[in-house]
Image: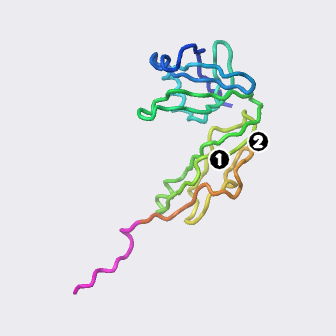
Amino acid sequence: MNKVVIEAMNRTEKPRKVRREGLIPGVLNGPSTASVPVQFNAAELKKLLVKYGQSVKLWIKIGAEEKFGFIKEIQRDPVSEKIIHIAIQLVAVDQDIKLHLPIIYEGRDVLKREFLQLQIEKSELGVEGRAEFMPSSILLDVSKKKQGENILAKDFDLPSQIKLTDREDEVFASIKGKNNSMTQDAEPAAAV
């Protein structure tokens, strides 16, 4: 497991004051403990999210202690889109968890060359399994799909330790032909 670590500091100030100091307020939620208010270095958190995405498994370092968890929620300012708060769910590495993982559809450029497009119905896949085996995202190659094909939950190749929680026959995406009115043969208008 790739160990991604971010440092957090205990927080005693109100979130607004923390944000004015250039930090991002947050909270650590544990399974059997009360929520712990923390704050993160804004630049470090943004760099982590750009590199690994929002569904990253990470270790939170507070002083000498490290705790394992997932990002549960990121709140953003509706105008500026800046992160204003983050909630992290702490779990034991060997704990069974349920998540919705983002789906990354690879091979869309091949579909485009074939004048096909991917119509996405759902962008996340429901899964459960041990935290240590949980991937950050689910990859699916759509380059060999043909027009009219549906991508079902059962089409995703999951690690053997991870189980699907969505219905196997649920449609996540479909392959459609592109509508291109320039290629249609139009009858010329009759002269009167």
Magenta residues, start to end:
180-192
Residue furthest bottom in the image: 192
Q: Amino acid at mark 2?
A: Gln
Up the image or down, 6 lies above or below 71; here it is: above
Q: Amino acid at mark 1?
A: Leu
Q: Position of residue 27 (x, y in %)?
A: 61, 23
Is 81 within the magenta? no
Q: Looking at the image, how many numbered discs can be counted on the residues?
A: 2
In the picture of the structure, the residue carrying the numbered disc 1 is 125
Instruction: Locate residue 153 relative to residue 19 in the image: left or right.
Output: right
Q: Position of residue 83 (x, y in %)?
A: 49, 29
- Based on the displayed image, in which of its 4 quarters is residue 172 positioned? bottom right
- Label 1 sits on a secondary structure element that is strand
Q: Quadrant of the C terminus?
A: bottom left
Report the residue at 66% width, 38% height from top.
135
Q: Position of residue 154 (x, y in %)?
A: 70, 55
**In-front residue for pair 143/74:** 74
Q: How many residues crowd around disc 2 within 10 Å: few (fewer than 14), some, or many (20 or more)?
A: few
Predominant SS of the magenta segment: loop
**In-front residue for pair 180/76:** 76
- Label 2 sits on a secondary structure element that is loop
Up the image or down, 119 lies above or below 94; here it is: below
